[in-house]
Each structure stands twice: as structure tokens, then as C-alpha cells.
Image (tube, grey):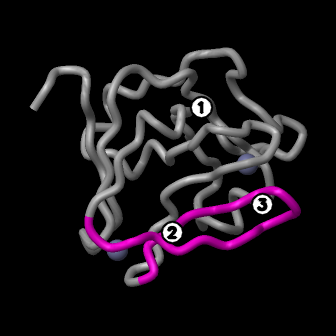
């Protein structure tokens, strides 16, 4: 495998992805929507252009969480996989936790930490 590719996938292994090149950003989102759609107290996203992401295995399912916002997940096991918003047309924001090697996805701004006003007070990043 090439050095600049990274892979990841859902918990059951049905949906897999490979990304090529560096993410545009790695940011942390403290919004309430992300909490509810992941069950985690905050989310970390790596933003890629759609053409950098190759999907393999079973097709992911999507849910429109608000107008123009699509969240992708595994239809078998429910693992949240990505976020796509009209505001960031042509981009796929993958959950860093879905990567096989998230260690390499260090948060780096901008945008840094977003939705700080919805952040849980005891969360320390
Ligand atoms: Zn799965
Ligand atoms: Zn969010």
C-alpha cells in the first residue's frame, strides 16, 4: 500500500474506505447533533475531498440530519462514518475514530474546535 493512503471502516467490517493524500483539516466538533448521532461526547473529523475517498465493501446508508446535511453510517452495525454538508460541497468529513490508525490524524486547524458554545463543560481535549 502507498504511504499516503489510510484505511478505515465500520465496527463489523462491512463498509471500508481508503483515503489518499492529506486531509484538508482535522477538527473537533462539540455540537449537540454530532453527540446524538454518535453517542460520543464530541466528534473528531478529518475533512477530505470526495475524490480522495474510495469506498469498498457494502454500501453505506445515509440519514439527512438537517436540510443539506447527510450523515453516513453502516447499515449493518450502525457505526457513524461521515458527514457531508452543502456548506462544504464536494467534501467528505470522515470520523477519525473510524480510521484503522487514528493516531496519525492529529487535530490541526483551522477550523480547530468548532461549536464550542455547545461543548460539555467537563470535556477536556
Ligand atoms: Zn458495519
Ligand atoms: Zn457537529
Residue 100 among magenta residues: no
Sequence-wise, which precedes: disc 1 or disc 2? 2
Magenta stretch: give its range. 57-75
Q: Which mark is residue 33?
A: 3
Left or right? Give the position of 88 relative to 8.
right
Residue located 79% across and 44% down the image: 119
Q: Which mark is residue 73?
A: 2
Q: Which residue is mark 1?
A: 125
Q: Work out how far the residue at label 3 is from the one at label 2, CA to CA, in angstroms.
A: 15 Å
Pick the front one: 102 or 25: 25
Whether ligand 2 has any atom under 8 Å from the Cβ at mark 3 is answered as: yes
Residue located 90% across and 39% down the image: 117
Where's residue 42, x and y in %?
A: 64, 48
Where's residue 114, x and y in %?
A: 77, 33
Does residue 108 lie above or below 38 as drawn? above
Pick the front one: 9 or 39: 9
Does residue 117 lie above or below 103 as drawn? below
Determine the residue located farthest toward the bottom in the rendered image. Answer: 76
Amino acid at each position: 500500500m502507498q504511504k499516503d493512503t489510510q484505511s478505515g471502516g465500520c465496527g463489523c467490517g462491512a463498509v471500508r474506505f481508503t483515503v489518499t493524500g492529506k486531509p484538508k483539516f482535522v477538527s473537533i466538533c462539540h455540537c449537540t447533533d454530532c453527540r446524538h448521532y454518535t453517542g460520543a461526547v464530541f466528534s473528531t473529523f478529518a475533512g477530505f475531498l470526495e475524490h480522495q475517498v474510495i469506498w469498498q465493501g457494502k454500501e453505506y446508508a445515509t440519514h439527512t440530519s438537517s436540510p443539506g446535511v447527510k450523515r453516513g453510517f453502516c447499515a449493518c452495525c450502525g457505526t457513524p462514518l461521515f458527514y457531508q454538508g452543502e456548506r462544504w460541497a464536494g467534501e467528505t468529513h470522515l470520523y477519525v475514530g473510524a480510521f484503522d490508525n487514528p493516531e496519525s490524524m492529529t487535530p490541526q486547524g483551522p477550523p480547530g474546535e468548532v461549536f464550542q458554545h455547545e461543548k460539555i463543560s467537563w470535556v477536556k481535549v
